Image (spheres, rainbow, N blue to C red):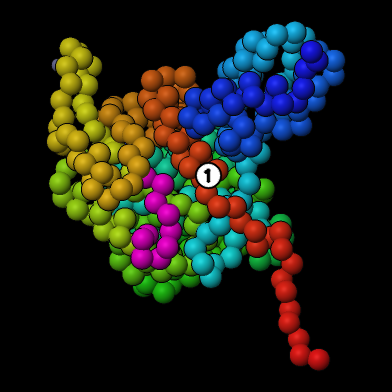
Amino acid sequence: MSLTVENVQNALKSVIDPNTGKDLISTKSAKNIKVDGSDVSLDVVLGYPAKSQIDLIRKLVIDALKQIPGMGNVSANVTMVIVAHSVQRGVKLLPNVKNIIAVSSGKGGVGKSTTAVNLALALAAEGAQVGILDADIYGPSQPTMLGVRGRPETIVENTLEPLKGHGLQVMSIGFLIDEDNPMVWRGPMATSAMEQLLQQTNWQNLDYLIVDMPPGTGDIQLTLSQKVPVTGAIVVTTPQDIALIDAKKGLKMFEKVGIPILGIVENMSIYVCPNCNHQEHIFGQGGGQKMCEQYGVNFLGSLPLNLSIRQDADSGKPTVAADPDGAISAIYKTIARKIAIQVADMSKDMTSKFPSIVVTNQ
Ligand SMILES: Nc1ncnc2c1ncn2[C@@H]1O[C@H](COP(=O)(O)OP(=O)(O)O)[C@@H](O)[C@H]1O
Ligand SMILES: [Mg+2]
Ligand SMILES: [Zn+2]
């Protein structure tokens, strides 16, 4: 009995990608299956950045196919392809940015910027092209967190070149204004400044652009959520009840403008004493999770209140860059992967594929 493509497909139905929890056939990840006598070759295409997962998935595929009687050589080429996904109705995607992820919070000081930059670095570490737009006009902090200084250059007329920090393309209002003399922004001025930064930055072929939104749910935030082509939003909160009330307002705002919520990250969830390792829920326990159940959104994970998170971010090298293989980075990377997998599952943007149809009366 000779080997068929169907034999291979059947075996692949039992190969579960541990990240998506789905098999490689139902996700259409297995492509280009070729049988040559007793040898098999195939491509496995993952829709999320997964550099650290490639060897693991290749091994799962090979082990499963080797179970088939008479199987010879198996060659599995695992790659990733990140595509653009659709955004709110009536808003156009940026030409060089596939997916925009907004990171917001109901109020300031909850660790939104720290979370945004570490998630951006985590996506980049997994092989994606990632940018970060610091849209927090009240307190631009990405220049400090990424240790990036200087003024953006203009090479192409009317555009700004993003600066580079730890492999990320970075744009911040902080590059253009004097940080020691914060400006007083009127709403329309603030939103048009942000729109310009978004549209006129010469982003280069980004898989993901992380937008560090201004905190809160006022007019500026609402206008930005209507104008920025967002694929999905993340809300960062601390576990206290008052923070959660504000976070709920954030969820409502995105709902109102039709932006899917990718989930909630709880920051400063638990304090682990460095001396005796005892754990303390300083700001309460389980609030984020409860809120997620109540609103039917994903709980993406929680970060501890941890001295090195603060020191790393404040010194210009966030934890995912400073200690990429540490326990804290592992949490950020897990959250980043959950986000990317959800984005991969969302409906694809077709606006760039279809020609616009013009109907004329003749
Ligand atoms: N999990 C954490 N553990 C300890 N410090 C943190 C943590 N997350 C953020 N911080 C620190 O808290 C401060 C506020 O964080 P930041 O990200 O600037 O908040 P936001 O952007 O929400 O205003 C910063 O000094 C940051 O380094
Ligand atoms: Mg901030
Ligand atoms: Zn102690």
Q: Is residue 158 above or below residue 266?
A: below
Q: Is residue 52 above or below residue 160?
A: above
Q: Does residue 346 show up? A: yes
| Rendering coords of residue 67 (x, y %) | 64, 10
Categorize mark 1 by other alpha carbons within 10 Å: few (<14), some (14-19), many (20+): few
The amino acid on which the numbered mark 1 sits, given as a three-letter code, is Asp
Q: As rendered, which of 174 and 265 lies closer to the eye?
A: 265
Give the residue number, with chain letter if any, for mark 1.
Answer: 345
Quadrant field for ligand 3: top left
Q: At x 67% / y 48%, what residue is drawn? A: 205
| Rendering coords of residue 129 (x, y %) | 61, 40
Residue 44 sits in quarter: top right
Q: Is residue 35 left or right of residue 256?
A: right
Q: Is residue 14 above or below residue 201?
A: above
Q: Which residues are magenta?
A: 254-263
Look at the image and say whether residue 77 sits in the magenta stretch: no
